[in-house]
Image (cartoon, rainbow, N blue to C red):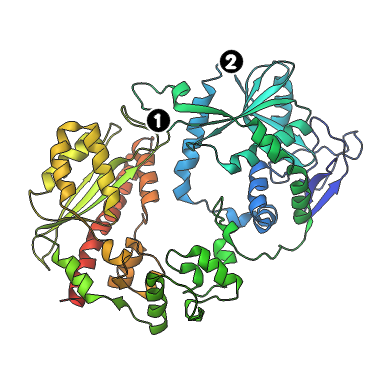
Amino acid sequence: MNRPTVFLDGLNVIRTSCKPQFVSFCVMTTGVRKHNGNSGGYSVKLDAEPGWLTKSKFLYGNQCHKWLWCLWHRPELFAQEVQGNQMLYDEGRRLGQLARLLYPNGIEAVSDDNSVEQRLRKTRELLKQRRPLFEAAFASNGVYAQADVLNPVAHDSWDVIEVKSATGVKAEYLLDLAFQVHVYNGAGLEIRRCWILHVNPEYVREGEIEPEKLFKRVDVTHEVADTSREIESRLDEMFAIIRQKKCPELEIGPHCLSPYSCPLQDLCWDFLPRHNVLTLYGGRKKGWELLNDGVLSLDEIPANYPLTQRQKIQCDAVRKGRPHINRKAVSQFLQQLEYPVYYMDFETFATAIPMFDGMRPYQMTPFQFSVDRVDRPGARPVHFGFLAEGRSDPRPEFLENLNACLGPSGSVVAYNAKFEEGVLSDLANAFPRHAGWVEKIKARMLDLLRPFRGFDYYHPEQLGSASLKSVLPALTGHSYESLDIKDGNQASYEYVRTHFCDVPEAEREQVRRHLEAYCGQDTGGMVAIVNALRELCP
């Protein structure tokens, strides 16, 4: 079936019939169309991809038609990029560059001016050379795609290689490749095999990065072929959505979160009450069931609906409008604290490409800690901190400084302590001479998450979460809102950006101050939580 090419005229999407050809495109830019001599097609200067159904639009549209429509007609809704994801985007670009080293005779197909028209023309010229192509661009019948790697094989065919930063093959990658193959076939290209080039989680860096060991190559040709049968009908459906003048009204559901987290959640979910059924602790599946039955709020859940004990506590706290406190259990937890108490928090980063010898992809690299020592109940905390400088491996200095500030006795408290314990175990394995004292520290650790995960204390304003960032404001009134760095993802990104990239010294120092404030808020928050619990359970 030949799909008409699409162009934008204001918010109206128009389709004109055209023959499948190597390049067939028609996008309204300045209101002037120039006939290209082919039946029904038009050729105009293209400014960018907005007038094309690209791979990303297809994948998001496959998840939600409202997402697709807004991408096409309301792109301003997506103007603010989520900074926490920027590190992933940057990593993806670096991985792509490393993957190209596996094809040393390859050529970059993206043109200098970066316009779609130039990309398409340059790709057509480079195909004649029969060499590996990077970011080769193709368009056919209103759809557009670029290949990470196109590798020439026998009989004028090509292999498609898609580079992914994950450590395995995911279902959405098959749909990704199926869309690409559809575009390439429509543009006249013969595809032999499809490959996923993903990160090898077992790779250990020793010296320079070895791309042939960093990546694993998986043949997914048959899986992509099975998925490809659905592409044509899905495209027809998406073009019908794009033509609509009004945004489609869709009910929210699990598709809002998987496989990609939709950036329109605040817009689509704004009808939900604050204590809605999707905040049910550990009960997202139940939440969707209740929502489908017309139950929006926790206090509307029928009395005979099956809930866990923790979910019952949550709903009861909402109905009564006050916290639930198991004073006996909280008191027993507090009695386990042995003074002096060391409240400890780590900040780490994890990269797909290991930065230092002996490390695997995505292995946590600690670069900062905060420790607050409290010598007796209610005493003012004594603060210790470490934030690595420079571009060398921060782990040895991290260990030396941590050992220096943790005394020989007393509880070591962390929130969700499994994280800190895991980091310490990795450090002990990497630096065996520190293993002795590290194991002793782990034996002294106490997890402040316990009374909240067990719902021995639950405040309605936690909204079904036992995380530190939910418990702290609900119990103490303190929060992270006034901080410039508000979460761990942002902390990781800002540290890597300012310490392993070239930025002005003044900017680096400013970020360091923000990092110290953020990490200190974690340990200071734990001190405040314990003090608040003591007041509630004297």
The three-letter amino acid code for the residue at tag 2 is Asn
Secondary structure beneath dot 2 equals: loop
The three-letter amino acid code for the residue at tag 1 is Glu
Image quadrant assignment for residue 150: top right
Count neighbours of disc 2 (C-alpha within 10 A) and say few if under 14, some if 14 to 19, many if 20 or more: few
Q: Which residue is mark 1?
A: 202
Q: Which residue is mark 2?
A: 105
Q: Position of residue 94 (x, y in %)?
A: 48, 32
Q: Is residue 538 visible?
A: yes
Q: Quadrant of the N terminus?
A: top right
Identify whether 389 is placed above or below 333: above
Sequence order check, earlier mark of 2 and 1: 2
Residue toward you, 357 or 137: 357
Question: Of tags 2 and 1, which is closer to the observer?
Answer: 1
> Does residue 134 appear to the left or right of 279 in the view shown?
right
- Give the CA separation, mark 2 to mark 1: 28 Å
Tell me what residue is drawn at x 46 percent, y 74 percent: 275
Q: Position of residue 138 (x, y in %)?
A: 72, 32
> Does residue 236 appear to the left or right of 424 in the view shown?
right
Farthest-out residue, bottom: 320
Residue toward you, 430 or 239: 430
Q: Position of residue 304 (x, y in %)?
A: 49, 79
